[in-house]
Image: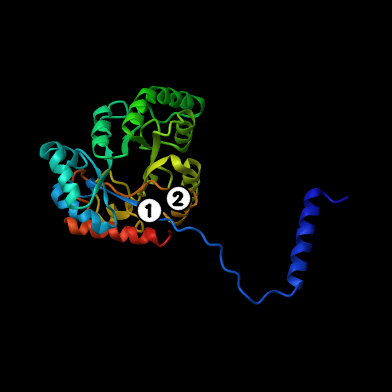
Amino acid sequence: MLRRRDFIERGLAATVAGALARPQPTTLLAAPWREPFRPKWLVASSLYGCLPLQTIAPEVAKTGSHAIDIWPLVHGNQREQIDEMGEEAFAKLLETHQLSLGCLTQYKLGPFGLASEMRLAERFGCKTIVTGGKGPSGLKGETLRSAVEEFARQLQPHLGLAEKTGVTIAIENHASTLIDSPDAIGWLLELQPSPWLAIALAPYHLPQDEILIARLIRECGPRIGVFYAWQHGKGCMMPQPKADELLQMPGRGPLDFRPLVEALRDVRYDGWVEIFMHPFPRGVPILETASEVTAEINRARNYLQQFT
């Protein structure tokens, strides 16, 4: 008597042999058409260090984007610049350069201190604020799940204000925070199903495994609010030659972004895509001049677009 596995394998072999014995068509079948992925590009002001918004704004459109992500000290100081120039002047600057405020990044305020920023975002039609997750890192198993559950509960009233202002709070999977692992991300999205909560997914802070990251993209799907086109390379926490520092950028370091972009396309991702890296020290442009920064963003964008 044949075992079930032997039966399947022999049957498969016979099927293949029969197929090969039949005459094969001479015409080639076209590959199935798939809708192309058109990323919504978002430009982080911090890539330009602490350069003035008047210098950064005209550069944004040159990168194929019409949306800016405003960062505060210490990574940039454009959020503080808005306070200095006033909201009316900032609105005029955006209008002049046909830009929108796509995102506000606020780690210092944390997820429970965003009320004033959500109201600012509402006034500018900004739909996304990025921050970090509060809580200890390094937890595992049920201990991690319980901590994430408590964090999800604490978020509830803040998500109520997010709904009123039309702003999504996107929690980055930042290292050394509660939400710093695939398990923590999955539990947060499961335990807090509010559509006003999302993940700001940063491959830099994950194992540099394209298959793992692509799978996580598919699992998170529409709950991703910002996708950082950012890899670890040689890190960003100490001085190093500029060529090594730039290994964080897509197309320079070893991470293959093809499976990641394909996963974004497969889930029909329509959130922000932000080409990103951190310089060392923080607060300086990633390259010496604004035009060089823009050129590097465009190089990375061209690399990514070949997979769309």
Q: Position of residue 185 (x, y in %)?
A: 45, 35
Foreground pick, 30 / 152:
30
Q: Residue at x 31, y 32 (%)?
A: 165
Q: For this view, does 221 lie left or right of residue 45?
A: right
Residue 286 sits above or below residue 206 on the image: below
Residue type, mark 1 in image: Pro
Q: Residue at x 46, y 31 (%)?
A: 193
Q: Residue furthest right?
A: 1
Q: Which mark is residue 264?
A: 2
Determine which residue is flagged by label 1. 39
Q: Secondary structure at mark 1?
A: loop
Foreground pick, 193 / 22:
193
Q: Is residue 113 visible?
A: yes
Q: Position of residue 249 (x, y in %)?
A: 32, 54
Q: Say if mark 1 contacts mark 2, CB within 8 Å.
A: yes
Real-space Cα separation, disc 1 to disc 2, in angstroms: 9 Å
